[in-house]
Image: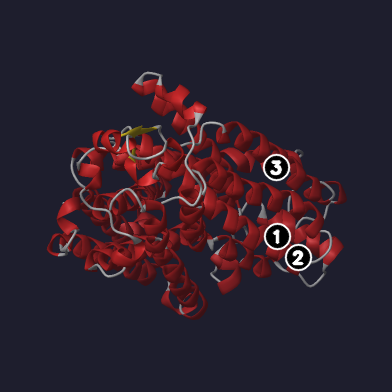
């Protein structure tokens, strides 16, 4: 039960008067807009080849990374290297912990208040980064790393949970559309960042740093301008971030005669879209953590997250080992990113039409095949590389759309934000394993064996999901 007494939301009432299609379009507009702003951490990346000495050119896939490292080397701390900056996106990934907080704030206050807290943290962290980057790496690390990650986790889970509440019979496609906004963010904001900082397309040095004063002086103002863009988008989106209106059940009408209107209990109120199926199973986080179904989903998400992050970090370094065409690599990434975003919607739709088990099994099997045969593209040429890259990105899109759907179907709608927060902690665990493998083994394994090893992870996810029906709640996703 909420600690704050639930009040009628006139905006929710107004949205509910619209036709079903217009209603969900309005709600998705708000959720997708928020995800577009918080998904920009994908523009911050570092190439493993630089850190771990792959024999490729010193180019960097992160759009923001070289600008920030170059500024700090020249004006803040000469000892800063691009390698040091990798810890910032690592800590921006703390958002799984923040998702648990987002679930608590949403249930305690309201989705709009919860989303406001998350968005305010994200936008303020970006704005404060304009000051922090001029003074110390540690301050910048805390502001742009931890604070951004905390806010994005709260806003992420609140936005997608609210959208699902308006379409409980289309959980897969709704979560897929919202996740597509998160995935498209880097494709939209990376050109904006480049246009603000480097409109003349000035080149970096062979080590990947920029030294032109006119470029470097634009870096702090980049954060201010991005904060203004994010703030405007979020302010508009927050207007429509709300749960559907609540109604009184029949049992409540009879009770109302004996209970003063000011003492109505929230437990007697139900969303207008509630049905018997939605309320048959409602597990709290403590109950969920005792279920074997949760650990099957946790292990499967661990495997999916690991292979996706490994491939995302390696595809460009591998491609550059036999493709000397930067324009082609940029085009290939853009095509694959758009395909990934569209695929998130497609996987969600497939889940709604069939089941979570069928959709994820299909995605993981295809991912294993693409990863296992990726070394063949060296001989087949860059056209084949584009096909394999796009195919793998399409498979990766299933992860973001499907697991929150499985969380709702297995453990109920009421605690989905908290439950999903605990489930997605598996991505943090997979990130730790990825960092360990990157640091100690990448230099000796080589690309061929690395892709073979990585292909095992989606296959393990396939095996786990194939057996999930024998767990207590597993039949709900088969």
* Rendered image: mark on residue 236: none
Q: Is residue 32 above or below residue 108?
A: above
Residue, disc 3:
226
Point out the tag, 2 or 3, that comes first from the N-terminus: 2
Residue 429 spot, x, y in % from top left: 43, 71
Count of picture labels: 3
Residue, disc 2:
139
Q: Quadrant of residue 246?
A: top left
Q: Secondary structure at mark 1?
A: helix
* Rendered image: mark on residue 143: 1
* Alpha carbon separation for disc pair 2 and 3: 19 Å
* Alpha carbon separation for disc pair 1 and 3: 15 Å
Q: Is residue 359 above or below residue 247?
A: below
Mark 1 touches mark 2? (CB < 8 Å): yes
Position of 145 with respect to 278 (left or right) is: right
What residue appears at the point 33 percent right and 42 percent down from the top-left corner?
Answer: 268
Position of 315 with respect to 165 (left or right) is: right
Work out whether residue 329 or residue 82 is closer to the camera in this orientation and state it: 82
Residue 419 spot, x, y in % from top left: 37, 58
């Amino acid at each position: 039960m909420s600690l704050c007494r639930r009040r009628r939301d006139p905006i929710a009432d107004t949205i509910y008067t619209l036709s079903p299609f217009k209603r969900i379009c309005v709600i998705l507009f708000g959720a997708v807009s928020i995800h577009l702003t918080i998904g920009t951490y994908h523009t911050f990346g570092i190439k493993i080849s630089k850190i771990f000495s792959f024999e490729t050119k010193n180019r960097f896939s992160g759009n923001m990374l070289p600008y920030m490292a170059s500024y700090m080397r020249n004006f803040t701390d000469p000892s800063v290297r691009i390698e040091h900056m990798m810890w910032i996106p690592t800590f921006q990934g703390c958002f799984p912990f923040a998702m648990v907080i987002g679930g608590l704030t949403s249930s305690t206050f309201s989705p709009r208040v919860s989303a406001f807290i998350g968005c305010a943290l994200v936008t303020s962290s970006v704005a404060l980064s304009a000051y922090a980057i001029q003074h110390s790496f540690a301050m910048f690390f805390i502001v742009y790393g931890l604070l951004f990650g905390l806010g994005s986790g709260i806003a992420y889970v609140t936005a997608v949970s609210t959208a699902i509440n308006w379409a409980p019979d289309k959980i897969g496609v709704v979560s897929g559309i919202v996740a597509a906004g998160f995935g498209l963010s880097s494709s939209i904001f990376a050109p904006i960042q480049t246009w603000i900082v480097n409109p003349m397309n000035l080149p970096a040095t062979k080590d990947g740093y920029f030294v032109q004063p006119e470029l470097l002086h634009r870096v702090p103002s980049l954060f201010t301008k991005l904060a203004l863009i994010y703030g405007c988008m979020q302010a508009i989106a927050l207007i429509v971030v709300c749960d559907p209106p609540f109604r009184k059940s029949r049992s409540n009408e009879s009770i109302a005669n004996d209970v003063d209107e000011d003492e109505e209990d929230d437990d007697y109120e139900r969303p207008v879209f509630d049905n018997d199926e939605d309320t048959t199973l409602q597990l709290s986080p403590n109950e969920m953590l005792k279920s074997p179904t949760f650990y099957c989903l946790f292990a499967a998400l661990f495997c999916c997250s690991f292979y996706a992050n490994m491939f995302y970090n390696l595809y460009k370094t591998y491609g550059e080992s036999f493709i000397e065409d930067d324009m082609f690599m940029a085009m290939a990434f853009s095509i694959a990113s758009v395909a990934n975003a569209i695929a998130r919607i497609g996987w969600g739709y497939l889940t709604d039409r069939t089941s979570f088990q069928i959709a994820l099994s299909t995605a993981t099997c295809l991912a294993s095949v693409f990863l296992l045969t990726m070394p063949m593209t060296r001989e087949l040429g860059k056209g084949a590389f584009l096909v394999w890259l796009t195919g793998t990105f399409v498979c990766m899109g299933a992860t973001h759309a499907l697991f929150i759907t499985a969380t709702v179907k297995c453990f109920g709608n009421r605690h989905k934000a908290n439950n999903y927060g605990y489930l997605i902690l598996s991505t943090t665990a997979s990130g730790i394993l990825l960092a360990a493998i990157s640091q100690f083994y990448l230099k000796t394994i080589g690309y061929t064996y690395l892709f073979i090893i990585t292909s095992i992870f989606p296959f393990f996810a396939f095996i786990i999901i194939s057996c999930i029906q024998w767990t207590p709640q597993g039949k709900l996703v088969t």
